[in-house]
Image (cartoon, helix red, strand yellow):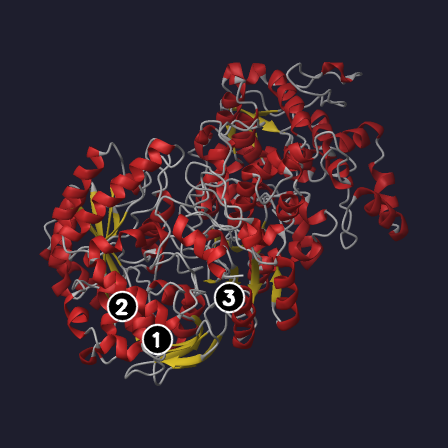
Amino acid sequence: MGRAGWSGRAGRTGRAGAGGTDPVGHADQTRQADRPDLPRLETELRARLRGEVRFDTAARALMTMDASNYRRVPAGVVAPRDAEDVAAVLDVCRAHGVPVVARGGGTSIAGQATGTGVVLDFTRHMNGLLELDPGSRTAVVQPGLVLDSLQCAAAPHGLRFGPDPSTHSRCTLGGMIGNNSCGSHSVAWGTTADNIAELAVLTARGRSLRLGPGWAGAPEGLRELAQGELARLRTGFPDLPRRISGYALDALLPEKGADVARSFCGSEGTLGILTEAVVRLVEAPRARALAVLGYGDESAAAEAAAGLLPHGPLTVEGMAADLVPPGAGLPGGGAWLFVETGGHTRAQARARAEAIVRAADVVDALVVTDPAAQRTLWRIREDASGTATRMPDGSEAWPGWEDCAVPPARLGAYLRDFRALLSAHGLRGTPYGHFGDGCIHVRIDFDLLTKAGVGRFRLFSQELADLVVAHGGSLSGEHGDGQARAELLPRMYGAEMVRLFERAKAVWDPDDLLNPGMLVRPAPLDGNLRFAVLPGEPVDVAFGYPADGGDFRAAVRRCVGVAKCRTATAAGPAVMCPSFRATGEEEHSTRGRARLLHEMLAGELITDGWRSPEVRDALDLCLSCKGCRTDCPVGVDMATYKAEFLYHHYAGRRRPAAHHSMGRLPEWLRWIARTRTAPLLNALASVPPLAAVAKRLGGIAPERRLPRLASKTFTGWWRRRKPARADSAGDLVVLWPDTFTEHLSPSVGRAAVRVLEAAGLRVTLPPAAPPHRSAKAAHPATRTRAPLLPRRVCCGLTYLSTGQLDRARGVLRRTLDLLEPVLRAGVPVVVLEPSCAAALRTDLPELLHDDPRAARLASAVLTFAEALERHAPHWTPPAVDRPVAGQTHCHQHAVLGDAPDRRLRESAGLTGDLSGGCCGLAGDFGFEKGHFEVSRACAEDQLLPALREAAPETVVLADGFSCRTQLEQLAGIRGRHLAEVLAEALETAEKARTPDGDTGQGR
């Protein structure tokens, strides 16, 4: 069987060889007889390899896409352990005529990390830093090593790797070499190719080569090829700093050292498979300053960029106002240049930055030397790769012309012509990027869902290619050609040079085994589009998805693959993605889950729809932390997608025991309160055999201890307490008695009442209704009757997290009925449990999108700190004057915001910052059977290490009940809600004023 029948045919037709479609949805017509024997291929690979071999549906679905517009279904995925495994894969695949595609972090934007054959995933095992030599300023790395890991290892020696793409926290060195990546510091330190010393490569026929200058490692025939085309190599390549398109054959010129390693960079896995690299490191400045220069518009910023280069900046980055979030703290203007300078001291770096400000003709400027403030500003620029995927009106925008480059001096003129071309085609896009190198990133609102839209995409691409060439530019200035631009290379290089590229490919890979369809004999730029396989009509869903026009397909399309969720190390206050950091598995990243949902909707690989076990298993370890809602640059909300999926997956089917025991927790706890059996149940739970039986029946992890129930509920205490003074003139607030405060931590509610009243506020609880005797009281809009509807308000959190959305609707409608008087009066609602506040702020209006009261309640919800800041602005909290440790609640980080909490802590003398991440308990997640190890790993990511380093006098803050429970069960540490800390300080201060200790509060 010839291999052209499988992958070669795909390269010529532009259709995925394994179940792909063309841009208008026609199925691939490759004859089944031409396809390889995949079971036999898998068997032989398993017999030859020590690494993982996966041909299952989930593994293949996870690798169908990178960060581009393209989709190809692979035959299987291999995670090699070493170069011997790679050689074995090449040997077996060559025998079967199956192509091989090397893949790192999967962040490529042109489609070159997708393929129809066997995908090599280097991130699992071949991800090591083998050697770092500060003396020679070199490091030996494996292809799967994440760039930030190298930077962290080099930093103590005052060194770093120069290139730094915005995906530095998850892109790999192998991917950077394959694409010849650059990043923001290329004006100072060049591209990846400029920083490579040697490369260890396996050819498609299994030959091991060590590439370097002076023809080192050149395969047979390469030298003769280059020497026969010296004139073309000297004249056929544009002279600009960001020429990434095509093969870098000019690096083989004798005057350039005949550097085979440099020539290999940017070949996108089409010439050989990288197994090891020796990279050069540069000296990192001891201090840095960042000058943010404001200009009237992007053209003015672009024209100014080239004039700043003689000052020796480390970066000259540009972006316009459309990509900047409100309140970002940038100086005045409609576009900005981010110009970084270095020095031996902070003063020296600042002086260089201020000199650049004086030399620049700016509207406004800002110079920052504080590292934390610089990181905050840089995050705005780095997140543009995700932010740019949405237009200001929320419509979608796509790559395809993500990174073309022109000579820096022509950038302003090019941008004006580019804008004119966009207007001529009725398209929109917001350029940003490496203005100092003339490299522009832009995502454009192409219609890639219809035949007419795809046709316009092709025509625009052709005309833009001509425009780039007219300005002396390169079709790719950073991300490579892939499928997005390789078809257009003749417009840039001419037919003869492209034929030379084909000859070079044949020297390295005569069998066309490696990543076919890329760079030479490319697939059409409008083939294999990932959107073509999605259903043509909207999917019936429960949530409203207001940011996506109510369309679940558009919600899933939000994930464009930039993979910020794959950040493997803790990064400041960020939360996303705790399960990926715990397991390192793609299927446990936000991107991986989004990919599986995409394939579920496509229905080709995953054919079970909402019943899919692959999607269910991937979502099983989603903590519903909502971190992706904020940390993901495009706002993917996997917690909502998970609830939606579980709702459909278990419709009419038996649910797991944990969905009943913990998903319906409010019902059980109300029953316990009514029967006053909490002391009895606590006693029974303290008997190990009985507790074990209860946990087994409830689907609860055997490693967990059952939390103790409060013998007296918070509302019970409220009814018995002495009324507060009626002469208070403060604002009225309604204190929400959430399930956890009510039944498990009533001390938090008591403390909150104490503090709110001390601040002069009038506190009341929400209205209640008599107990219901029948399920007939369920709201008519619910699909099923919800028994045991609450007679008190409830946010529905436990029903939402387990996908019991019918019950959640009933609970929330009943809550809105009860709160009608509160909503009419416009009284704020103070919610102490962050998860409950987040559910009311976001899930409530998105689930009950047809009920205007939902949005009114969502806007009325305040956190404890927000209530004090807004309604008691002149109150001074008691002085605690102690350091704090703990973790910002993940829902507070993602949904609520913690700025008021930080200000409240500061005013109380609580010093220090809380860590990011997720505690790992996450409501029912950490209690569910099979989740304990991941739950503990999440806690060990940031929370527990921060507490081990804390001083003995440190106050441990944990506003969430789950966080407090996790701390108690894993570390024996008592965490406290901020309200408890302040209430205790009030008590202490009052006792100091009244020696007899009578506070008069009836406590």
Q: What element carries label 2?
A: loop
Q: Distance between the residues labelled 2 and 1?
A: 31 Å
Q: What element carries label 1?
A: loop
Q: In this view, does 528 lie to the left or right of 587?
A: left
As rendered, which of 299 and 786 lies closer to the eye?
Answer: 299
Q: In which quarter of the image is the N terminus?
A: bottom right
Drawn side of residue 224 relative to residue 857, left or right = left
The number of discs equals: 3
Residue type at numbered disc 1:
Gly
Of mark 2 and mark 3, the one earlier in the sequence is 3
Mark 2 or 1: the one toward you: 2
Element under disc 3: loop
Name the residue carrying label 2: 248
Label ID, residue 158: 1
Mark 2 or mark 1: name the one nearer the start of the chain: 1
Q: Distance between the residues labelled 3 and 1?
A: 28 Å
Pointer 3 or 1: first along the chain: 3
In the rendered image, is residue 430 in sight? no
Q: What residue type is labelled 2?
A: Ala
Packing grade of label 3 (10 A; few <14, some 14-19, many >=20) is: many
Front-lying residue, 715 or 47: 47
Q: What residue type is labelled 3?
A: Phe
Identify the image quadrant of the C terminus.
Answer: top right
Rendered residue at 25%/40% (across/down): 460
Q: Name the residue under label 3.
A: 122
User: In the displayed structure, would residue 289 be above or below residue 991?
Assistant: below
Label 2–label 1 contact, CB within 8 A: no
Residue 587 placed where, x, y %? 58, 52
